[in-house]
Structures are given as C-alpha cells and as structure tokens.
C-alpha cells in the first residue's frame, strides 16, 4: 500500500483497500474514503533493454537553467534526409533553419553566449552540476531584471558563479574565479555584491573549515594534521579569532600550525601560495593563534 495509514479514522477498522484506478484508499467496513487523488509514481510499462526504454519513454531531458530555453526548445537539425528534397525545397528548409537562429529576443541571445561562458568557467574550476545550475538560475534572473546592462557579461557570470559557490558551500576564492574568467577580482566582488543585493539573495559568511580539505590535499598533509587543523579552527571560533579575518588566511594558518604540531614541515611560502594569500597574512594569523590559544608548548618543530 502506498500510504502509512494503518486504520480507518472513522470507524477504526483495519480492512483497507487501495483502488489504483481511482487513486483512493477506502475502508471496506464503512466505505469511508481515507485518501483520494493519489499519484502513482511508478511507470505503467515494462522494459527489457535500453532500446525499449528509449522507445517507450514519453518524456525528454529534465528542465535546466544551463540552457537558454531551459532545454524545452527544439532545433531544426541537418539530417541526411534533407538532401533527398528538391533544390527549391532544400533552400527553403535552410532558410527556415537560419531564421530560427535569427528570430530570438535580446535576452535569449545574451543567455546563449553567457551560459556557454558559465559552463566553460565551471568546467575549469571543476564545479559540481548543482552549482552550475544555481549560478545559471541567478544569471537568468539578473538578465530578466536588467542587471547586466552596463556591466560586462563575463563579470556577471563570475559573480553568479561565486554566489552559487557560497550558497552551496563549495570553497572557491575570488582569485580562482579571476584566473578562470580573466576578470579582475575586485570587479567580480563588486558585481557579486550588486547582484546578490538586487536579487535579495542571502548568503552567510564563508566558513574557514570548508577550505581545509583542499588546502591539506594540495600540501599533501596527513588526515591527522587536517583533523588537528579543524580542532584549532573550532577553538579559534570560540575565542572569536575568525571574525573580521579572511577565511582562507585563517584556514591556511591553522593548517600551518597543525603541520608544525604533527612535525610535518611546510614553509609559510608553500602554505601562502596554495591558499592564495601573502606570507605576512599567514605569519600574522599564526602568531595570533599561538598567543591566544596557548599552542607554543605543543609545537615540536617551530619554524618562523
């Protein structure tokens, strides 16, 4: 039975039947209709191989914001059957195909170019499909509200991608987006703040813990060091050492301290290059962590 109902609420009977044709659950004792208009999510056909599945399936690909028409549009193709037509009919066919591309709104033309750029940057940064989908939705809303006017398409695409990364807690820095898109990181930051403010997108501050796995993997640090860095960050958050500081800097510094505690030698230059911050930032955060968390005694090999 497709429901968790155990007994009839009217008479308390347990003799219930499911009428699949009408989508109802009925009490056989008193005739009370307990549930109606139930949806059967199963398929009504059988398939024994992939070819049968393709032939009998009546739906296409799911809707997606990563296509300008959400994947619902059709395209006049160029199959071999076209060349069986007479010359006049063939020319007519190609004219129709050309006009299908020409007759499109300004928003559609913008989305065609922008979503291709979005996929390119997303592929370069190895972003998951959920982030690409969310960023495409944000960009589509921005175009419909006229927020792209007066700004470069690439900067709005990068701002939408950064917003989607922040919403899905996928750690990507402005420096990485700048490298992938070729847009100055300050411009991406300005566009990101403008788009999120105009669209009312609420984004929480980045959590430094999200950056630890990437940095630890790049520095080839052990799992014990990564776990120790998480402990240090949790202590730092309790002592309010993370507020007002860049998440990448404090994450990198906690990894540097954890590596020293576990006697895994990494230079401040190596850590700074991986995190995309300066050595001065690592040094300042490192000194703050040692002083406020009393970690000097735990470090086996201290290397400034």
Image (cartoon, grey):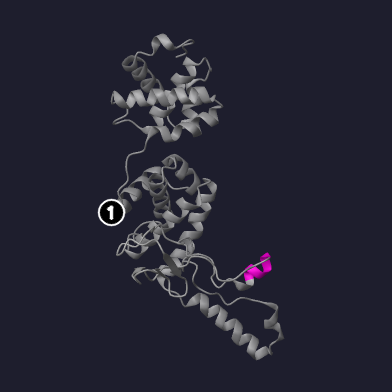
For the C terminus, the quadrant is top left
Q: Residue at x 44, y 42 (%)?
A: 170
Q: In the figure, 64 relative to 242: above or below?
A: below
89 with respect to 74 (left or right): right
Q: Residue at x 48, y 10 (%)?
A: 300
Q: In the figure, 225 relative to 42: above or below?
A: above
Main SS, magenta region, reads helix
Q: Is residue 63 visible?
A: yes
Q: Is residue 51 magenta?
A: yes
Q: Quadrant of residue 94?
A: bottom right
Q: Quadrant of residue 135?
A: bottom left
Q: Quadrant of residue 80?
A: bottom right
Q: Which residues are magenta?
A: 49-54
Q: Residue at x 29, y 30 (%)?
A: 243
239 with respect to 15 (left or right): left
Q: In the figure, 133 relative to 144: above or below?
A: above
Q: Position of residue 278 (x, y in %)?
A: 42, 27
Q: In the figure, 166 relative to 148: above or below?
A: above
Q: Which residue is mark 1?
A: 200
**Observer-nearest of 10 and 249:** 10
Q: Is residue 23 magenta?
A: no
Q: Position of residue 258 (x, y in %)?
A: 46, 20
**Observer-nearest of 170 and 12:** 12
Q: Residues within 10 Å of mark 1 (few under 14, many from 20)?
A: few
Q: Position of residue 114 (x, y in %)?
A: 46, 60
**Observer-nearest of 21 and 123:** 21
188 with respect to 44 (left or right): left
How many labels were placed on the picture? Answer: 1
Q: Position of residue 4 (x, y in %)?
A: 40, 57
Q: Is residue 241 visible?
A: no
Regarding mark 1 in the picture, which secondary structure is present there? loop
């Amino acid at each position: 039975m497709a429901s968790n109902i155990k007994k009839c609420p009217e008479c308390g009977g347990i003799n219930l039947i499911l009428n699949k044709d009408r989508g109802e659950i009925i009490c056989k004792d008193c005739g009370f209709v307990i549930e109606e208009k139930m949806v059967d999510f199963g398929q009504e056909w059988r398939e024994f191989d992939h070819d049968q599945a393709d032939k009998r399936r009546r739906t296409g690909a799911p809707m997606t914001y990563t296509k300008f028409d959400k994947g619902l549009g059709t395209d006049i193709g160029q199959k071999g059957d076209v060349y069986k037509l007479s010359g006049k009919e063939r020319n007519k066919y190609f004219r129709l195909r050309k006009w299908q591309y020409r007759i499109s709104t300004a928003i559609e033309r913008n989305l065609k170019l922008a979503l291709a750029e979005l996929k390119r940057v997303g592929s370069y940064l190895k972003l998951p499909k959920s982030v690409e989908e969310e960023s495409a939705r944000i960009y589509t809303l921005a175009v419909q509200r006229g927020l792209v006017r007066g700004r470069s398409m690439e900067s709005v695409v990068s701002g939408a991608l950064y917003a989607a990364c922040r919403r899905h807690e996928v750690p990507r820095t402005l420096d990485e987006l700048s490298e992938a898109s070729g847009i100055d990181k300050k411009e991406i930051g300005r566009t990101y703040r403008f788009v999120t403010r105009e669209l009312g997108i609420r984004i929480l501050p980045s959590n430094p813990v999200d950056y630890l796995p990437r940095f630890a993997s790049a520095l080839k640090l052990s799992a014990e060091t990564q776990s120790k860095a998480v402990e240090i960050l949790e202590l730092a958050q309790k002592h309010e050492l993370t507020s007002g500081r860049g998440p990448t800097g404090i994450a990198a510094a906690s990894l540097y301290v954890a590596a020293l505690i576990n006697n895994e030698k990494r230079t401040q230059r190596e850590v700074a290059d991986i995190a995309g911050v300066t050595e001065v930032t690592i040094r300042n955060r490192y000194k703050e962590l040692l002083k406020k968390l009393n970690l000097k005694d735990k470090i086996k090999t201290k290397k400034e």
